[in-house]
C-alpha cells in the first residue's frame, strides 16, 4: 500500500501538483521501498532455498531410514527363520536324545540280563563239573552218567543194574550203588526228582497193569533209598514217564536197555531264573 501511495505522489508531481523537492523525497522513498522489497524477496528466496535444501536432506534421510528399516526387517525375517530352524533342530535333538536314552537303558537292561544269564550259566557249569567230580568213581565204573537234558542236569542210571526184569525190588548191587549216589546228593543243597522210564515192551500183571505203574514203583523205590541214604525227604520226589520219553529207538536190545533207566533230575530253582520277580508279581494278581 505504501508503494502505491508513493507512485501516486510521483504521478501528481509529474503533473505539477507537488514541488520538485517533494518529488525527490518521494522518489527516494520509492527507491528505498523497492530496495527493501527486493531485499525481503531475496531473504524469502534464500529462506525458501534453505527450506528446500532441508526438505531434500530430510527426504534423503527418510529414504535412507526406510532402506535401513527394510534391511532390518529382512534381517529380522532371516533371524526368525534361523530361530525356527534351530528350534526344530533342538526338538529333533531332544527327541533323538530321548530315543537314545531309551535305547541305552534298554541296552543296559539287556546287558544286565546277559550278565545274569552268563553268571547262571557259569554257575550251572560249575555245578556240572562238581557233580562230575563227585561221581567220578561211579562214572568210571559205568554205574551212572551225568547228562544235561532239556536244560536240566541229571544223574542217569540203567535199571538193569538196579532191578530185575519186570520187578521194582532193588537188587543188592542196586542198593549199594544208590547208597553211594545218596551220599553225594545229601551234600548238595538242591532239590531232586527221581524219574522212572521203561522200554515199550508192555506189562500186564496184578501189581503192574502197565509200564506207568512199573516206572512209578521203581522211581518210588529209588526215592526211598535216597532218603535212607541221607537226602532230605522234602528235597526229593518221584515221577513216572513209562515208555513215553525214550532216548533211543526200541527196535533193538541195546535201544530197549538204554530206555530202561532211572533219572535223578536236579530241579531248577526258579527264584534264580531271569524274570522271576515278574512271574511272582503275575502270580499274585
Image: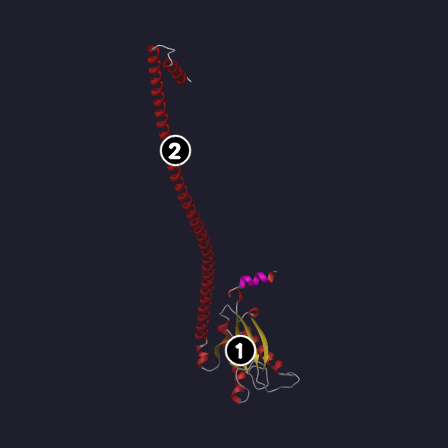
**Left or right relative to 24: residue 229:** right
Task: Report the residue that reaches farthest toward the bottom.
Answer: 252
Residue at the right extreme of this rendering: 206
Dominant SS type (magenta): helix
Please state which of residues 66 and 88 is positioned toward the viewer in this rendering: 66
Q: Is residue 84 above or below residue 41?
A: below
Mark 2 lies on a secondary structure that is helix
10 Å crowding of disc 2: few (<14), some (14-19), many (20+): few
The label on residue 55 is: 2
Q: Which mark is residue 263?
A: 1
Q: CA distance from mark 2 to mark 1?
A: 115 Å
Depth check: 229 or 181 in front?
A: 181
The C terminus lies in quadrant: bottom right
Residue drawn at x 57%, y 68% as measured from the top left: 234
Q: Which residues are magenta?
A: 276-282
Residue 192 pos. (x, y %): 54, 72
Q: Which quadrant does the N terminus fall into?
A: top left
* Observer-nearest of 72 and 224: 72
Amino acid at each position: 500500500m505504501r508503494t502505491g501511495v508513493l507512485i501516486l505522489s510521483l504521478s501528481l508531481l509529474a503533473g505539477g501538483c507537488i514541488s520538485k523537492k517533494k518529488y525527490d523525497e518521494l522518489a527516494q522513498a520509492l527507491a528505498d521501498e523497492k530496495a527493501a522489497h527486493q531485499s525481503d524477496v531475496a531473504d524469502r528466496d534464500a529462506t525458501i532455498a534453505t527450506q528446500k535444501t532441508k526438505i531434500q536432506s530430510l527426504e534423503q534421510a527418510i529414504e535412507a531410514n526406510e532402506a535401513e528399516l527394510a534391511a532390518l526387517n529382512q534381517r529380522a525375517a532371516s533371524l526368525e527363520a534361523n530361530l525356527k530352524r534351530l528350534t526344530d533342530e533342538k526338538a529333533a535333538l531332544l527327541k533323538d536324545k530321548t530315543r537314545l536314552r531309551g535305547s541305552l537303558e534298554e541296552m543296559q537292561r539287556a546287558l544286565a540280563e546277559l550278565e545274569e544269564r552268563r553268571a547262571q550259566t557259569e554257575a550251572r557249569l560249575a555245578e556240572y563239573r562238581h557233580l562230575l567230580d563227585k561221581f567220578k568213581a561211579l562214572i568210571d565204573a559205568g554205574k551212572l552218567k551225568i547228562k544235561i537234558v532239556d536244560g536240566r542236569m541229571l544223574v542217569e542210571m540203567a535199571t538193569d543194574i538196579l532191578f530185575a526184569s519186570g520187578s521194582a525190588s532193588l537188587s543188592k548191587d542196586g542198593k549199594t550203588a544208590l547208597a553211594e549216589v545218596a551220599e553225594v546228593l545229601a551234600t548238595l543243597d538242591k532239590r531232586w526228582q527221581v524219574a522212572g522210564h521203561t522200554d515199550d515192551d508192555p506189562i500186564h500183571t496184578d501189581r503192574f497193569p502197565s509200564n506207568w505203574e512199573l516206572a512209578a514203583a521203581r522211581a518210588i523205590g529209588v526215592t526211598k533209598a535216597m532218603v535212607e541214604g541221607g537226602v532230605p525227604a522234602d528235597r526229593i520226589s518221584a515221577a513216572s514217564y513209562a515208555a513215553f520219553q525214550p532216548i533211543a529207538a526200541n527196535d533193538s536190545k541195546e535201544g530197549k536197555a538204554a530206555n530202561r533207566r532211572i533219572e535223578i533230575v536236579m530241579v531248577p530253582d526258579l527264584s534264580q531264573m531271569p524274570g522271576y520277580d515278574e512271574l511272582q508279581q503275575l502270580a499274585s494278581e
